[in-house]
Structure formats: structure tokens, C-alpha cells
Image: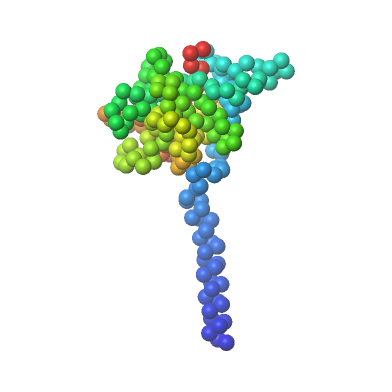
Amino acid sequence: MRRTTSALLSLSALLAVSALAAPGVQAATPKADGPVAVPSGWEAVDGTELARIAGESEEPGAGRAPFAADGGVSTAAVEPELLSVRSARNGKFVATEASYPAPDTGMLRARSAQVGGGWEGFAFEWDEASQTYALRSLANNLYVAVEKNYTGSAQNVLRARSATAGGWERFALYYNEGLDRWALRSTLNGKFVAMENGYTGSLQYALRARSAEITGSWEEFSLQGYGA
């Protein structure tokens, strides 16, 4: 009887420890493709909201989506929005390095002083089922992927290299009205996209999904209409 009681007490103690430890493990390892908390001061933006907010932007040429007679956004709002992305950190537009040699072909870098030549254009394609965006580069017509398997300083770099959009190519989009800035979060690893201003060489100003939170201008961008 004593042995049975001791065994039950040991089992109860083990379960108690496991119950206490579980939340911590879950918080430390967020599910990459599951729901995540929206950062304070930011709002998650769906396809309709992107068209509305972009339409209200003061950037020249921004906002392609027409408005319906009742003042709402028309059904065209769910169509891809053609936009350019500008880093709040260095003020440069994000370009697709289509001419970079492998394995960096199609890398995204915030390095252009102005928009031109198709290098700085992206189609933001909303997917209602997954509630995420895929970004298709207008430079090479390929989708932007997060290179999770890369190592070293290039790990999680963004590259326009995919013919279709799957888990590697999905992003959540956030907007901060007070700052009038945007942020992207990869659903593959749950990290925010940052611009590597401190890098040197061919990786300088590269975009990487590597930040656990929005810390400032490294993870903040502005959007404006492309080719409007």
C-alpha cells in the first residue's frame, strides 16, 4: 500500500511540473503557421483594408482600388495591390536582385533611391483561406520566400525565387496608423522582416525575417502605389 501511495504521489508531482512547464515551452516556440498576437499599436491588415489604407495614403500615386458608390471599397480591392516598399531605416526602396548569382538570385535589398525599371515593384496577393499575403516580385514574376534553411548571416533572408506560393512564401501584414508605417511577419518562422542596415558587401540592406518583435525602424516600412 505504501509503495502504491508513493507511486501515485510521484506521478502527481510529475504531472504538476509538466503543467507548469508547458505554457513556457509553448510561448518560447510559437506555432509558425498558427495565429500570433498582434503587436501593440498595430493592426492586422487584410486584402480589403490594404486597398482602403493604401487609397488614403499621401504618397504620390498610391491606392489603385476603386471605391463603391456607398463609400466602401469595391470588389476590385481583393485583387493584387501593386506596391513599392520603402525602408524606414535608410529611406531606400526594396529591390529584387534578379541578377545576383546563385544562391542569392532574387534577394530583396533596400538599396534604391527611387522606383524604376521594375526592380522595386511587388504584387501583394491576399489569400482569404490562410488570411495571409504572398509577395510576387515584378522584376522576375516570382514569389518572395524566406530562406529558413540558409545559415549564418543569410539565414531567413527574403528571396523572390518561387513559382508558387506555399508556407515559405506567406506573410502577415500589419499597419500602425500613428506612425503610418507597415510591418511584415513571416508565417514560416513567426519572425518580423528587418532591413539589415549594418551588413556590408552584397548582403548590405538585405531583408531578413529575424526579429521577434517590432523594435523600431529596422522592421518598419512605408508602402506606395507602383506604376500608378
Residue 22 appears in the figure: yes
- The reply, left or right, for residue 114 in relation to residue 41 is left
What residue is shown at x 36% (from left), y 42% (from top)?
149
Residue 42 appears in the figure: no
In the image, residue 9 sits, relative to residue 84, either above or below, namely below
Q: Position of residue 47 (x, y in %)?
A: 59, 27
Q: Position of residue 76 (x, y in %)?
A: 62, 20
What residue is shown at x 30% (from left), y 41% (from top)?
152
What residue is shown at x 40% (from left), y 14% (from top)?
116
Front-most of 98 and 28? 98
Q: Position of residue 204 (x, y in %)?
A: 31, 29
| In the image, farthest residue toward the bottom | 1
| In the image, farthest residue toward the front | 163
What residue is shown at x 47% (from left), y 50% (from top)?
29
Res. 138 image quadrant:
top left
Judging from the image, the colouring scheme is: rainbow
Front-most of 144 and 222? 144
- The reply, left or right, for residue 204 in relation to residue 162 is left
Q: Position of residue 202 (x, y in %)?
A: 28, 28
